[in-house]
Image (cartoon, rainbow, N blue to C red):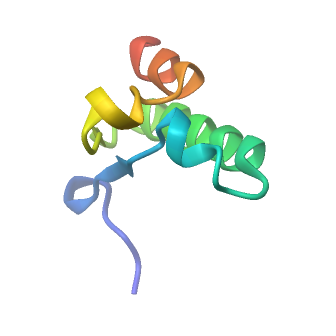
Amino acid sequence: MLLSRDKSQVLIVDVQDKLLNAISGADRVIDRCVRLVLAARKLAIPVTMSEQYPQGLGPTHDSVRDAFAND
């Protein structure tokens, strides 16, 4: 089954600092999320970011947020 750009979306979920502290290889996770966001933007695929309880878990990691800002 081939994916269609018109029927696709990238969802980035909970890439937050306090959660990343508990992940082995968090730097790779961040790098892959940034690459995915930038690639989706170049392909005109919609990208959405979601955060869980940012007051307690912190905001989405700066690098990932910066990738969203690079339109």
11 displayed left or right of 24: left
Task: Name the residue located 27 percent from the left edge and 45 percent from the top edge.
Answer: 52
Q: Quadrant of the C terminus?
A: top left
70 displayed left or right of 50: right
The image quadrant that residue 4 belongs to is bottom left
Judge whether 27 appears above or below 62 on screen: below
57 displayed left or right of 64: left
| Image position, residue 62 (x, y; %) | 54, 19
Nearer to the camera, 34 or 30: 30
Judge whether 56 appears above or below 24 on screen: above
What residue occupies the far left of the structure in this picture? 7
The image quadrant that residue 58 belongs to is top left
Judge whether 37 appears above or below 4 on screen: above
Q: Quadrant of the N terminus?
A: bottom left
Task: Name the residue located 33 percent from the left edge and 51 percent from the top edge.
Answer: 11
Specify whether residue 39 is in view: no
The image quadrant that residue 69 belongs to is top left
| Image position, residue 54 (x, y; %) | 30, 31
Judge whether 12 appears above or below 39 on screen: below
| Image position, residue 45 (x, y; %) | 33, 43
Nearer to the camera, 48 or 30: 30
Task: Name the residue located 71 percent from the left edge and 47 percent from the top edge.
Answer: 26
Specify whether residue 13 is in view: yes
